[in-house]
């Protein structure tokens, strides 16, 4: 089975414009993510972007990159265009890796790919245990509820994804990590559907899959990577990564 990793990235993020090129240890965030994905060794890695600045930066740091349209509503749309532009016919799975998580665990990337192949899953994603109670009420932290208990050895189906917690019982509730692996034909199906009402209201594109009866399996991640949406989060992850090196 062959997997292609595509990292969608753009400069015009609403909360932190220009974040892909913010530097940590002298290297841009997007290039850190690219290097992590390469280190996981699950398949070829390509950055998909609408911005010439990102193209130049990724190339300068030795990465593969492709220029895509500016007219995409979601990252998955950009990933699908990149897949078509690359013209690869021998790909079984496409992994959509977020471009703003430079500290993502390499073993988590590998584990998701392994489980996708083992379970012949249509769509797979990651989730981590919630240790900080404030995460339950933080709208910026996406939660996933699984139909069955989530462990290192399981790959249960997602029941729902949410930003707000309205349920009192927090069993089988985890921090969703924005990485997706699609079986190629399922990715084509997903893209063919219009954005669902649920997806637009919650600003969660994975709900489009559930609303169209496409199953999403969930693998347990080792830890919750920090996604960079604000300057505060950038400063936090910068400190952590600089300390590690």
Image: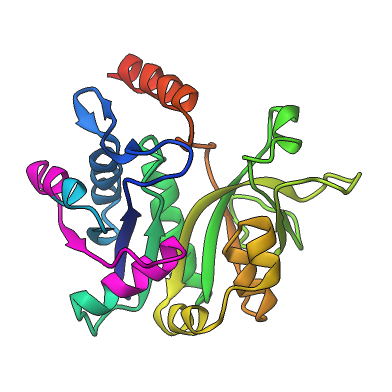
Q: Which colour scheme is used?
A: rainbow
Left or right placement of residue 142 versus residue 45 in this view? right
Across and down, in percent, residue 16 comes to 42, 36
Q: Which of 117 and 137 is in front in this view?
A: 137
- Is 75 a magenta residue? yes
Across and down, in percent, residue 139 comes to 68, 40
Up/down of 120 relative to 179, above or below: below
Q: Give the range drawn in magenta.
A: 56-82
Left or right placement of residue 204 versus residue 71 in this view? right
Up/down of 33 relative to 236, above or below: below
The residue depicted at 61 percent of the width and 56 percent of the height is 203
The residue depicted at 77 percent of the width and 51 percent of the height is 172
- Is 74 a magenta residue? yes
Q: Nearer the viewer, residue 215 or 233?
A: 233
The residue depicted at 31 percent of the width and 63 percent of the height is 70
Choose top left, top right, bottom left or bottom right for residue 49. Answer: bottom left
Q: The N terminus appears in which quarter of the rendering?
A: bottom left
Q: Can residue 217 be seen in this view?
A: yes
Q: Nearer the viewer, residue 37 or 111?
A: 37
Left or right placement of residue 198 versus residue 181 in this view? right
Up/down of 145 relative to 195, above or below: above
Q: Is residue 114 visible?
A: no
Across and down, in percent, residue 206 comes to 59, 64
């Amino acid at each position: 089975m062959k997997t292609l990793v595509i990292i969608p990235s753009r400069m015009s993020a609403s909360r932190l414009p220009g974040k892909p090129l913010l530097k940590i240890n002298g290297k841009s965030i997007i290039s850190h993510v690219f290097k992590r994905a390469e280190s996981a060794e699950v398949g070829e890695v390509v950055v998909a972007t609408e911005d010439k600045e990102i193209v130049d930066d990724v190339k300068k740091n030795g990465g593969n990159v492709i220029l895509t349209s500016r007219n995409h509503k979601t990252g998955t749309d950009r990933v699908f265009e990149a897949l078509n532009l690359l013209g690869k016919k021998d790909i079984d799975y496409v992994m959509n890796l977020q471009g703003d998580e430079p500290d993502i665990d390499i073993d988590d990337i590998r584990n998701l790919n392994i489980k996708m192949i083992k379970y012949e899953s249509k769509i797979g994603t990651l989730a981590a245990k919630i240790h900080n109670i404030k995460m339950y009420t933080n709208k910026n932290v996406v939660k996933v509820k699984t139909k069955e208990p989530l462990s290192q050895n399981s790959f249960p189906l997602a029941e729902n994804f949410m930003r707000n917690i309205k349920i009192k019982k927090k069993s089988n509730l985890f921090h969703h990590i924005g990485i997706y692996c699609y079986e190629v034909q399922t990715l084509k199906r997903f893209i063919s559907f219009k954005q669902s009402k649920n997806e637009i209201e919650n600003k969660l594109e994975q709900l489009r899959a559930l609303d169209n009866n496409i199953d999403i399996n969930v693998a347990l991640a080792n830890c919750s990577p920090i996604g960079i949406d604000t300057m505060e989060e950038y400063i936090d992850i910068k400190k952590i990564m600089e300390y590690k090196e």
